[in-house]
Amino acid sequence: MSESETAHKQRGGTVVAFPVARAQDAKVSFDRDELRAILNVYGRMVAAGEWRDYAIDFRKDKAVFAVFRRSSEMPLYRIEKDPKLARRQGAYSVVAASGLVMKRGQELRRVLEVLEGKALRVVE
């Protein structure tokens, strides 16, 4: 044993290895083009006075961009990216506050079109 190992054992501590990111620890996220498309829609809706805040959550299984009317409320809409559904229903979806999937598809820009309709105005 080296001197440093002996000295360390005498103090009663243990060496803990620094955690290394593994492929299984990876989280799903939006890439630059996806965020640009989402933030373009968000910016237009903020300018129209419809939306005021957002939150982004990167989980192991999906990425979520949540839109709020007020930051103290539940999200009005969630834009989700779920790679497990990419081959079946489409990786992207827009989900209303009630849990209703408003639109799902393979292309993010086409899915986001549902949020830009004239019928989507918040009634107070």
Image (spheres, rainbow, N blue to C red):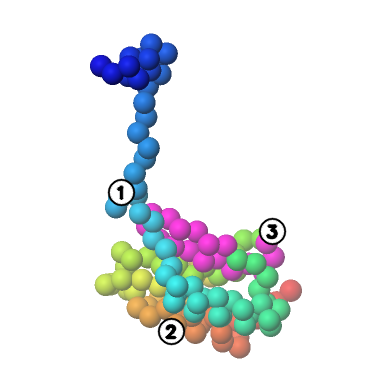
**Disc 2 residue crowd, few under 14, some 14–19, many 20+, Cα 10 Å:** few
Q: Is residue 61 magenta?
A: yes
Magenta stretch bounds: 55-71
Q: Could one spot residue 52 in this view of the protein?
A: yes
**Disc 3 residue crowd, few under 14, some 14–19, many 20+, Cα 10 Å:** few
Which amino acid is tagged 3?
A: Ser
Residue in the foreground of this view, choosing between 30 and 118: 30
Q: How many marks?
A: 3
Q: Could one spot residue 98 in this view of the protein?
A: no
x, y percentage for residue 107?
A: 38, 80
**Residue drawn at (37%, 22%) of the image:** 14
Question: Would you say 56 lies left or right of 107 here?
Answer: right
Question: Would you say 55 lies left or right of 79 here?
Answer: right
Residue that mark 2 sits on: 110
**Residue drawn at (69%, 65%) of the image:** 70
Asked if labels 2 and 1 touch by Cβ distance under 8 angstroms, the answer is: no
CA distance separating discs 1 and 2: 33 Å
Earlier residue among tags 1 and 2: 1
Residue that mark 3 sits on: 72
Q: Quadrant of the C terminus?
A: bottom right
Q: Nearer the viewer, mark 3 or mark 1?
A: 1
Residue in the foreground of this view, choosing between 17 and 51: 17
Q: Dividing the picture into quarters, in which one does residue 80 lie? A: bottom left
Q: Dividing the picture into quarters, in which one does residue 48 lie? A: bottom right
- The local secondary structure at tag 1 comes to loop
Earlier residue among tags 2 and 3: 3
x, y percentage for residue 63?
A: 44, 62
Residue lying at the far bottom in this picture: please name it.
118
CA distance separating discs 3 and 1: 36 Å
Residue in the foreground of this view, choosing between 70 and 8: 8
Residue that mark 1 sits on: 22
